[in-house]
Amino acid sequence: MKINTGVLLAGGTGSRLAPSTNIVNKHFLNIFDKPMIYYSISILLLLKIRNIKIIVDSDSKDILEKLLGTGDEFGISVDYIIQDKPLGLPHAINNIFVKDSKLENFAVVLGDNFLHGREFFNNFYDLIDLEKSNIFFQKVNNPQDFGVLHLDEEQNLIDIVEKPKDFISDLAVTGIYTFDDKFFQYFKSIDLSDRNEFEIADILKLYMKDKSLNHIYLGRGMTWMDMGSNESLLNCSNFVRTIQERQNILVNSPHEVAFRNGWINEEQIEKLYRDNNQSTYFQTLYKNVQSIY
């Protein structure tokens, strides 16, 4: 069995990036040569997921549709679901169930997450357990900014602590998850937190209680970043620029991923290039697909 549906979270206020995000959704901000959301949607495409549901606020929906359309440009299907109030990740995901009552196993990616490296994508189905929920963690030097894992000496999961003031571990939970349809049952039993949001940690703890939560280390060969702060925007842009200029490749280009997956062809890439021939992104894309071997 494969995961066929991906959920991409592209709402939220992006308050840490104000004043820029006072006028535009943070997922439209550029990370070097392409918008932030290109990087996160590429995660789903690299997992060969073609049915994508994007959670977005009503103010951003039209702009996002102009950018991604129906998904035809990438050989995928995109459905937009509006979250009118920022009530947290579980609430956003639950909105999908209103439109798709047959949703079973699905992947979730936060729109400000960046992931680069082959190991995770090449071994994805060897790493996960489709009979459980799967979360992915990575070592960080600023654990106080993330939800972190508390593991025992045998690496069993004891707890997930959100933005701990005191050091618990340096193992941050990334914004990449897989869930089954128990998610929607669990959502009914959680309440709003002090932040007036439904917290994903509460859902994960219910999976833990049922011994249905699998935690997976991304490993040293993978680069993960949360692009939610000014510092991380700059760091990620510099990382992408360095890799692309040294290796003459595109990092997390959904067009190139779609081409490599066989979902779009060279003629479609050529048309995109002709329509955007002043863009260095499309220039590099067109050049690279001609030299893929």
Image: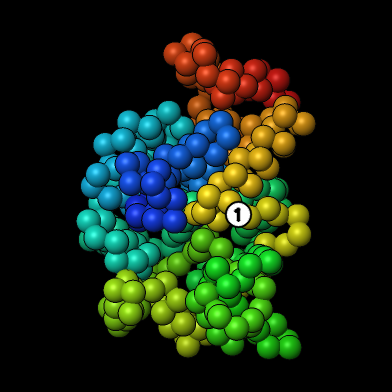
Q: Position of residue 106 (x, y in %)?
A: 44, 59
- Circle 1 crowding by C-alpha within 10 Å: few under 14, some 14–19, many from 20: some
Q: Could one spot residue 76 in this view of the protein?
A: yes
In the displayed structure, would residue 242 be above or below residue 97? Answer: above
User: Which residue occupies the foreground of this view, 100 or 89?
Assistant: 89
In the displayed structure, would residue 165 be above or below residue 88? Answer: below
Q: Position of residue 222 (x, y in %)?
A: 70, 54
Helix, strand or loop at label 1? It is: strand
User: Which residue appears at 42% of the width and 39% of the height?
Assistant: 28
In the displayed structure, would residue 10 be above or below residue 181? Answer: above
Q: Amino acid at mark 1?
A: Met
User: Which residue appears at 24% of the width and 60% of the height?
Assistant: 85
Give the position of the C terminus as an image quadrant.
top right
Q: Position of residue 215 (x, y in %)?
A: 60, 73
Q: Which residue is mark 1?
A: 225
Q: Position of residue 138 (x, y in %)?
A: 66, 65
Q: How many marks?
A: 1
Q: Is residue 133 left or right of residue 94?
A: right
User: Which residue occupies the foreground of this view, 125 or 188?
Assistant: 188
User: Which residue appears at 50% of the width and 76% of the height?
Assistant: 162
Q: How is the image coloured?
A: rainbow
User: Which residue appears at 34% of the width and 38% of the height?
Assistant: 64
User: Which residue occupies the foreground of this view, 19 or 251?
Assistant: 19
Q: Could one spot residue 113 in this view of the protein?
A: no
Q: Is residue 3 left or right of residue 217?
A: left
Q: Is residue 201 left or right of residue 114?
A: left
